[in-house]
């Protein structure tokens, strides 16, 4: 039984997208990722599963230095470079899948073996290949996802079906109908391929409004992940607005400093005010 002083008052959520040596936007180089994961273990952090994070949000006692690690999209580099590190260190993480871009295929090599690794390009090239109709070359496939799922460390959730900003293309009624269909399609694919659909959803492009929130909740998604970093995930707080920190492509020390502010609302509020002040001055 955890005592009050040993329980978390706030749980930060980390957001990764790419882990590749080939650079680009939204990337954390493999050497930095490995250093960060080793740092977290060495500093006594408890990496939560999605179910454990949900339990924390519902008010269940959670170890004081808890952290939830997420990845977005389902990119191949997550399997090739990040997964072997997580597996070796025994670290839990969740991956949100853009289900329209995940295809069938044979399991490819990763750094856990000695075979030649598939090329994992930077973000812009990934986007280009997906738009050209070849997502299989830059995204994980279902066999690789099921392998990761069987490890018991990695679970998978919805990132909707496509990454379309319907609010840029359709009127109010149209974009809501399109998002409703997106959520239905994503659920159907996850259920067919993995046998389950969770209550966790990450918003494509980070965009959401009150209509989207209502649609997601009606579809059974109750833990809704934003791209907003300036806030705190507190017990029995708003699970429809979960804050996440973008993991830096830097040393573990920089991550540790950011997590200090994320875990301590007293310090964190002052850090956020500092960030917002200089953002306005820029």
Image: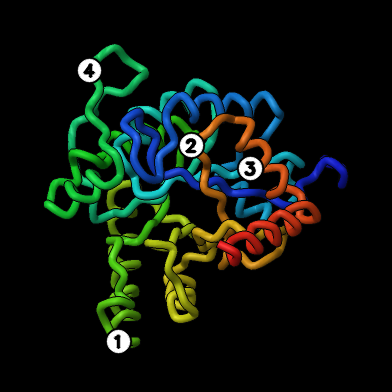
N-term-proximal mark, 4 vs 3: 3
N-term-proximal mark, 4 vs 1: 4
Q: CA distance from mark 1 to mark 2?
A: 38 Å
N-term-proximal mark, 4 vs 2: 4
Few, some or many C-alpha atoms within 10 Å of disc 4 (few <14, some 14-19, many ≥20)? few
Q: Which SS class for mark 4?
A: loop
Q: Position of residue 59 (x, y in %)?
A: 73, 57
Q: Position of residue 119 (x, y in %)?
A: 23, 29
Q: Is residue 267 above or below residue 226?
A: above
Q: Is residue 219 above or below residue 272?
A: below
**Residue 160 lies in quadrant:** bottom left
The residue at 42%/70% (across/down) is 219
Front residue of 81 and 183: 81
N-term-proximal mark, 2 vs 3: 3
Q: CA distance from mark 2 to mark 3?
A: 18 Å
N-term-proximal mark, 1 vs 2: 1
Pick the quarter of the image with the C terminus: bottom right
The answer, for residue 142, to whether it is visible in the render is no
Q: Position of residue 143 (x, y in %)?
A: 26, 35
Q: CA distance from mark 4 to mark 2?
A: 25 Å
- Of badges 4 and 2, the one in the foreground is 2
Q: Which residue lies under the disc numbered 3?
A: 67
Q: Which SS class for mark 2?
A: loop
Q: Which residue lies under the disc numbered 2?
A: 249
Q: CA distance from mark 4 to mark 1?
A: 48 Å
Residue 116: assigned label: 4
Few, some or many C-alpha atoms within 10 Å of disc 3 (few <14, some 14-19, many ≥20)? many
Q: Which residue lies under the disc numbered 1?
A: 171
Q: CA distance from mark 3 to mark 1?
A: 39 Å
Q: Position of residue 182 (x, y in %)?
A: 30, 68
């Amino acid at each position: 039984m955890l005592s009050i002083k040993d329980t978390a008052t706030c749980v930060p959520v980390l957001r990764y997208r790419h882990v590749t040596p080939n650079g680009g936007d939204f990337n954390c180089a493999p050497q930095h990722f490995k250093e960060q994961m080793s740092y977290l273990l060495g500093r006594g952090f408890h990496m939560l599963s999605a179910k454990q994070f949900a339990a924390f949000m519902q008010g269940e006692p959670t170890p004081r230095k808890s952290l939830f690690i997420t990845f977005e999209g389902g990119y191949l580099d997550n399997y090739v470079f990040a997964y072997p590190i997580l597996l070796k260190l025994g670290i839990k993480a969740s991956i949100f899948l853009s289900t329209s871009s995940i295809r069938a295929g044979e399991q490819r090599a990763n750094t856990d073996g000695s075979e030649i690794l598939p090329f994992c390009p930077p973000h812009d090239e990934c986007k280009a290949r997906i738009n050209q109709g070849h997502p299989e070359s830059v995204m994980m496939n279902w066999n690789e996802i099921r392998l990761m799922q069987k490890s018991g460390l990695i679970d998978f959730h919805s990132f909707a079906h496509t990454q379309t900003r319907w609010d840029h293309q359709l009127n109010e009624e149209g974009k809501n109908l399109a998002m409703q269909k997106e959520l239905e399609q994503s659920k159907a694919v996850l259920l067919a391929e993995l046998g389950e659909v969770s209550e966790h959803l990450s918003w494509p492009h980070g965009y959401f409004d009150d209509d989207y929130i209502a649609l997601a909740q009606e579809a059974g998604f109750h833990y809704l992940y934003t791209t907003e970093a300036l806030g705190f995930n507190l017990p029995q707080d708003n699970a429809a607005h979960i804050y996440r920190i973008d993991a830096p492509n830097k040393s573990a020390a920089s991550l540790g400093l950011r997590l200090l502010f994320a875990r301590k609302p007293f310090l964190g509020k002052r850090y956020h005010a500092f960030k917002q002040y200089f953002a306005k001055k820029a």
